[in-house]
Image: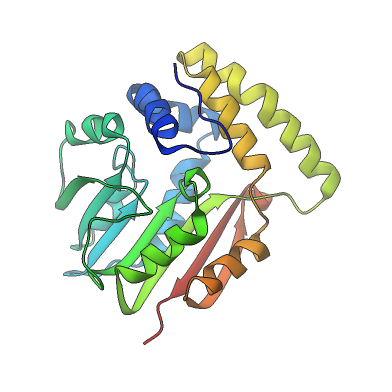
Amino acid sequence: MTRARLDKRPADVSAMFDAVAPRYDLLNDVLSLGQDHWWRRVVARTVAAAPGERILDLAAGTGTSSRSFTASGASCVACDFSLGMLQVGARRPQPGALRFVAGDALRLPFRDESFDAVTISFGLRNVADPKAALQEMCRVTRPGGRLVICEFGHLRSPRLDAFYGRYLATMLPAVARRLSSAGDAYEYLAESIRDWPREAELGRWISGAGWTAVRWRALTFGVVALHAARRPT
């Protein structure tokens, strides 16, 4: 299978996620020890989708996270550039107003100020130019609208973080190979987590892209970081 590398060429990343799509949600559940369910609930509470609002869920994959936004009466666009992921999600029952759209985070196929909130979970680090993607998200969000990013983070202790990095590099691909043919893909994912910036640096990227009121919190001892911001009015 295609194994993406840290230069994150879109065709490689897309092909890699196409290949893991059928068992992606199962692998997430196993590899996170079930924590992914809690992370999604925290994201949904932070987005706080209200009835009638339009939510853009980027890097939505199979739309698992997107369904939590439509439960409140909002409409949601699940956008991803992996057609394999979108096809798996579209075959499932669609509660509420959920639409699947193929799109690149660097060139979103939406008009300016189209959404009340934009969110991306575990996808920003897979974009070739995250800073440009943050600017695109700002473009399609209405003034006063919300941004919520859930992404892997780093443990506070450098020693524990180094141990965690070794765990990711060895255990993630090994477990993935037992459950699917996705071991190579999870080698890339481990590398991308290790090389991702810490919370404060990502916060500076978000501010630099035009967002305000940037804040963040650590989840699961820093394994995951949740960032939130608003588009200026």
In the displayed structure, does residue 169 sit left or right of residue 186?
A: right
Q: Is residue 32 above or below residue 79?
A: above
In the displayed structure, does residue 119 sit left or right of residue 95?
A: right
Residue 4, given in percent of the width and then of the height, sits at: 51, 29
Residue 219, given in percent of the width and then of the height, sits at: 60, 54
Residue 67 at least partly seen:
no
In what quadrant of the picture does the C terminus appear? Answer: bottom left
The picture quadrant where one finds residue 191 is top right
Q: Is residue 150 above or below residue 86?
A: below
**Scheme by which the image is coloured:** rainbow
Q: Nearer the viewer, residue 52 or 118?
A: 118
In what quadrant of the picture does the N terminus appear? Answer: top left
In the displayed structure, does residue 1 sit left or right of residue 57?
A: right
Q: Residue furthest right?
A: 159
The residue lying at 38 percent from left, 70 percent from top is 138
The picture quadrant where one finds residue 91 is top left
Q: Nearer the viewer, residue 47 or 139?
A: 139
In the displayed structure, does residue 39 sit left or right of residue 99?
A: right
The residue lying at 32 percent from left, 40 percent from top is 81
Residue 179, given in percent of the width and then of the height, sits at: 47, 15
Residue 141 at least partly seen:
yes
The residue lying at 62 percent from left, 41 percent from top is 193
Q: Nearer the viewer, residue 113 or 226?
A: 113
